[in-house]
Image (spheres, rainbow, N blue to C red):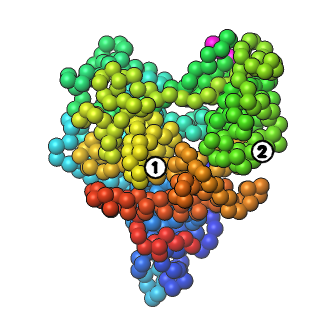
Amino acid sequence: MSTSTGTIRGPDFSLGIECASLDDGAILAGHVDGKPAVLVRRGYEFFAIGASCTHYGGPLCDGLLVGEAIRCPWHHAEFNIRNGEVTRTPAIDRLPCWTVEIRDGFVFAGKPLARDARPTKAAPAGAPASVVIIGGGPAGFRAADTLRREGYEGRVTLISADASLPCDRPNLSKGYLAGTVPDDWLLLRPAEFYRKHDIDVRLNARVIRIDVPGRKVELDDRSTYGFEALLLATGSEPVRLQVPGADLPHVHYLRTLADSRVLVASAQRSRRAAIIGASFIGLEVAASLRARGLEVDVIGREAVPMEQVLGHEVGTFLQQLHESHGVRFHLGATPASIDGQAVTLDTGERLEADLVVVGIGVRPAVALAQAAGIGVDRGVLVDRYLETSVPGIFAAGDIARWPDPLDGQSLRIEHFVVAERQGQTAARNILGRQEPFEAVPFFWTEQYDLGIAYVGHAAEWDETRIDGDLEARDCSITYRQAGRKLAVAVIHRDREGLRAELQFERAIFNASSLAGAPPLASRDRPDASPDRARTA
């Protein structure tokens, strides 16, 4: 999705707005002395904050007010309306805020509020003296960032096998690969951030052993790092294709920033690409390579792309969308071999290709945990606080398998935003906050000019309902099992996605209350009043 340009529109709030013209819960777009802003009413209070989400620039005037927070319609980041602070990822930076004053029935925006680099907090007594984080993906980054935001002053070490600092991975298969996002836009934070906040980052470093009794980790260079608390955020590893020629230099996988840079360089000198795998990653890569002018063939085992995730109708729609952009599909087929000029399928068909991208799934990287005696079952097992079977060792991101707060069944989800939110929760629990992880899963995909957002989780369903017009790209799709709503996907109906997320949150809150679980922190509890979920 393209970022917002922050276009000036609407009234100047510094000149005053009649209070009675705004209903409770309203979000009005405007500006303060030429700077884009929204004016928010909550009860008898008014707040003037920045108009664009600090993630990708989503328009907050189209968002949702939930309690004292405003949620972005694009990727569901959330900000406190009192101080602009980020309360939910994927945003990192705070929103600008202005003072407000009510005079003679009018509300006026005034001076900008001071924006401290970090909120003033103090870590709780008894916090560990040192924290080691293994993994430089979204969960690891968010954990390190959150520890400092929560006032933790102990030693933080982030150990990453990647060559680059933590980056915006969703863009690797989208804008960056398509050539619309520059290289220097991808890092979540520059190197200076880690120095400023005293986060020791080790890149190109691989942990080979966790010494649980000794409370230390050993790296492949034989150096060791002691810890009082440890976060495993090792993520997933791409499933490798096992056919003759799969190790040729023009065969690529896409997981890291280094992978994407190599793929971009290869695409610039290639003419025709074969993509093995019709998953989200495969389809996003197909769209990005078509944007660069390459001929593209997509090979998939399934009869309809993405049918198992989005259903037959949406999968067929996606296939037709790609075909309208010149992509050729070869479904119900698998590669038999690869050579320097082509991919040969098990059907005998030979597809010319000087670039091959493999996206046939990932596996959680659990070897370290398993060797250390930490509980593993198709992922690292954690409790509702993301703590593993070993006290003081937590897990987050693609490797974590946690209990679903609605039905108690275990979940492991490979979504960027889920990993980020787990990193935040794990960090708070490392500090003893005792905050259950109960966030509703969310992901999005962008292919050409189409965006799909998905909230909830439906591994299986027996009913799919489309409300709206799929062909017109204006609809919501609801997935149910035995009458119970499990997930909702939206196409260009962003507010419906936010409302669906809120509905799932209320169901989780009610289920937790009935089970006698500790209540959510007040900033994370969905407000029960429907008036707090209104938009302008």
Residue 420 position, x and y percent, is 44, 43
For the point 44% across and 42% down, the residue is: 411
**Where 135 sits versus 150, above or below?**
above
Q: Farthest residue in the bottom direction?
A: 104
Q: Secondary structure at mark 1?
A: loop
For the point 43% across and 31% down, the residue is: 378
> In which image quadrant can residue 195 be found?
top left
Q: Nearer the viewer, residue 277 or 286?
A: 277
Other residues around mark 2 within 10 Å, as few (<14) / some (14–19) / many (≥20): some
Q: Nearer the viewer, residue 4 or 72?
A: 72
For the point 71% across and 14% down, the residue is: 337
Q: Farthest residue in the front direction?
A: 482
The residue at which mark 1 appears reads as 89
> In which image quadrant can residue 419 be found?
top left
Q: Secondary structure at mark 2?
A: helix
* Disc on res. 321: 2
Magenta run includes residue 248? yes
Magenta stretch mostly in which secondary structure?
Answer: loop
Compared across the picture, whether 523 is left or right of 290 comes to left
Q: Nearer the viewer, residue 113 or 339?
A: 339
Q: Amino acid at mark 2?
A: Leu
Compared across the picture, whether 428 is left or right of 261 comes to left
Q: Amino acid at mark 1?
A: Thr
**Where 289 sits versus 203, above or below?**
below
Other residues around mark 1 within 10 Å, as few (<14) / some (14–19) / many (≥20): many
For the point 46% across and 44% down, the residue is: 418
N-terminal label among 2 and 1: 1
Image: magenta residue range: 246-250
Q: Quadrant of the C terminus?
A: bottom right
